Image: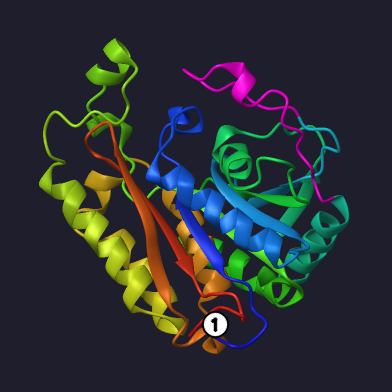
Amino acid sequence: MMAGLTPVHFFSHGSTMMLGEESESADYWKKCGDEALARNIKGVVIMGAHWDCLNDRIELATNPSPGKSPVAYVHPDKYVNYTLNPDLPTTTRCISLLAKEGFNVSGNDTFDWIHDVYLILIRMFPNACPPTTLISANARYDPHFHMKIGATLRPLRKENYLFIGTGGAVHNLYRNRWAPMLRFRDNFAMETPPEDWALEFRQAVEDVLTKTSGMQLRRAMTRLMKHPRFRDAHATDDHFMAAMFVAGAAGDVEDEKTPGVMGAESWELTNMCNSQFTLGRWQDAAA
């Protein structure tokens, strides 16, 4: 990885209950947040999985005082007092950069943030939210389109902005085992091992993010949507677009030989795999 580039994270956020329960993934999010604060990041640029726009549009959040969508099964005291910090100057700049590249893009000054974004921010930065630029996905779920969003904004990594995509490695709500959560509020219960389709696609995601880099990473990420187990692992494409955004932000020629690591993993509801990945490392980290 070329000197001076911040790492890029692809975090699988899983269920809303991960905001209220301790987990290996939550510990890893906190570790990554501490590292970012120690390097005095200017802000966060993030794409989640629960906000998308119709036709060919994308939007960026420009609400100066956004609210938070409620979180199911989590007591409000876990999140209601956390103050969000939209970075409106950087958001305006990102809108300009994206428009210059031909995107049909605008701001949305009424959007309230959703758990897929603030769940991660609360865990990473519990004391105060850093200046944050929030980008929508597009409801056509074109992998190359979302990869280009990440590639367009990638130069901000050289200015000490931290890029995060928050979605899911294996996220098919229709094939989860819901009974332990509904009966006992135990989302981490594993009465049986994950099914083979979930294990197989989870391994394919790890192989791509930890064994490829540069332009090869971008090609490999888009090919995952043609994997024979992709539709088993993702009944809808929304939770995989953040991975494409990350590949665009971390898959340039300059990113050749960038190390990718899986820092943590939490299985929920038997078949939902929340894998946490970091691409690249801080410049002063040990080789």
* Residue farthest to the top, as pictured: 183
Q: Front-most of 64 and 181? A: 181
Q: Is residue 28 above or below residue 75?
A: below
> Residue 207: horizontal and vertical position, in percent?
28, 69
Q: Front-most of 6 and 227? A: 6
> Residue 124: horizontal and vertical position, in percent?
60, 47
- The magenta stretch spans residue 153: no
Q: Is residue 162 above or below residue 123?
A: below
> Residue 12: horizontal and vertical position, in percent?
43, 48
> Residue 270: horizontal and vertical position, in percent?
22, 34
Q: Residues within 10 Å of mark 1 (few under 14, many from 20)?
A: some
Q: Quadrant of the N terminus?
A: bottom right
Q: Is residue 126 above or below residue 77?
A: below
Figure quadrant of residue 200? bottom left
The residue lying at 75 percent from left, 50 percent from top is 130
The residue lying at 65 percent from left, 40 percent from top is 126
- The magenta stretch spans residue 81: yes
Look at the numbered disc 1 and give the secondary structure of its residue.
loop
The residue lying at 60 percent from left, 42 percent from top is 117
- Left or right of residue 135: residue 96: right
- Read off the residue under disc 1: 252
- Left or right of residue 49: residue 195: left
Residue type (three-letter) at the residue carrying disc 1: Asp
Q: Is residue 94 above or below residue 168?
A: below
Q: How many marks?
A: 1
Highlighted range, magenta:
67-87
The residue lying at 85 percent from left, 57 percent from top is 92
Whether residue 56 is visible: no
- Left or right of residue 61: residue 233: left
Whether residue 113 is visible: yes
